[in-house]
Amino acid sequence: MNQFYNPVAVSLGAESAEAFAELFNKRYADVKRVLLLTRGAGVEQSDCLQPVLNAISKKETLLIEVTLNNPNVADIFKLKQQIEPFQYELIVAIGGGSVMDAAKVLSALQHKTFQTAAEVREAITSERYREEPDFTPWIGIPTTSGTGSEVTCWATVWDEENGSKYSVSDERLYARAALILPELTVTMPLRLSVATALDAMCHATEAYWSVHTNTITRAYSLQAIERIRQTLPLLLERPDNVAWREQLSLASLLAGLAFSNTRTTACHSISYPLTMLYGIDHGIAASITLTTVLRHNLDALIEPDKLFRAFGAADVNEVDNLIQSIYNIYGLSSSLSSYGVTVEGIREVVSHSYTKGRMDNNPVEISPEELERMLVSLL
Ligand SMILES: [Fe+2]
């Protein structure tokens, strides 16, 4: 079935910032209070953001710097306490995936009150947030190029205490609008730039082979992969090259659109325990198994030649070479043992790798025994 749905109004490029601000003024004329979440680090000084910030400044605004990484239930509880008396009618999130995930969770949970972090956990795991008649509208302005969170309708909340990761998911979590300004990504540390681009590469590739793939999502996937493949190896030379940053931002958006309709698969499902148990950056944790899972999925691929071509490759070995070369250029290790993973630890990784809606979204089933063998081969 070739159907595609995504309701986010997307604006791309600094030249769209003025028009975006005008639209903001018109559409949110009645909004009085705005919760502004930023990643800090002075991103709000950027010239290209000024039209939007000027528009927001006409409202009563509560600015919160969200410096946390991978928000967990305790972080959400703390954030809720911090902003509680402020009756926000709109959230604007300027940041990476963690900031946008926080915005989504605060959108879903605004009208719930919690006495403890355990109550936040319960509201999320029981999906009680879905009973809310209204979610607070939010706008995403990404400062990284990888997460795609500005065009998806789910957020990740971590729970180290219980060794779990939850998905807050609802159609109402789509942003009302997204403004993508590649200039904002220029100041990202190089390692984060690479990890987020690898994350986007996984979003696109996993969307390509997902059981929910279709002609439309695959077109987005191929465009995204090709742009990342061509641009990512160059970034080391000149990380401030805006033209390359534009390509990576566009690729991240296209990958986000692709997986907004398919969700991710095995690579992401396996990445969650790698991040939770060993602190491996999300994009690295996801991409470290990309070619191993590609080999596993080979027979189920639709038009594999097109996928290989997007990677500039003729077969899976050449895809592997490309990803290895990106890891090498940026001094990243593709060996799980270098991140502290041991043969004994792999059992625990396997036991946490079967996230519902992700692993079962892979086109070829991966048994725990097969997964264990795959991970041992990556040590
Ligand atoms: Fe991801």
Image (spheres, rainbow, N blue to C red):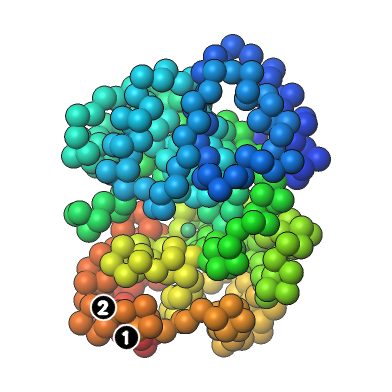
Say whether marks 1 and 2 touch (CB < 8 Å).
Answer: yes
283 on left or right of 241: left
Q: Is residue 318 visible?
A: yes
Q: In which quarter of the image is residue 60?
A: top right
> Reading the chain from its start, which is encountered first: label 1 or label 2?
2
The residue nearer to you, when weighing 92 against 82, is 82
Which residue is painted at 46% across and 82% down in the image? 334
The residue nearer to you, when weighing 211 against 15, is 15
Instruction: Identify residue for label 1.
Output: 376
Is disc 1 surrounded by few (<14), some (14 to 19) or many (20+) residues within 10 Å? some
Q: Quadrant of residue 285?
A: bottom left
Instruction: Identify residue for label 2.
Output: 346
169 on left or right of 316: left
Q: Where in the figure is residue 368, as x and y percent of width and height? A: 25, 74
Which residue is painted at 44% across and 75% down in the image? 289
Is disc 2 surrounded by few (<14), some (14 to 19) or many (20+) residues within 10 Å? many
Which residue is painted at 42% across and 30% down in the image? 107
The kind of residue tagged 2 is Ile
121 on left or right of 312: left
Checking the image for residue 2, the label placed there is none
Which quadrant is the C terminus positioned in?
bottom left
354 on left or right of 55: left
The kind of residue tagged 1 is Val
Residue located farthest toward the right when viewing the structure as drawn: 15
Q: Does 141 appear above or below 295?
A: above
Q: Where in the figure is residue 298, as x and y percent of width and height? A: 50, 78
Q: Where in the figure is residue 363, as x and y percent of width and height? A: 43, 66
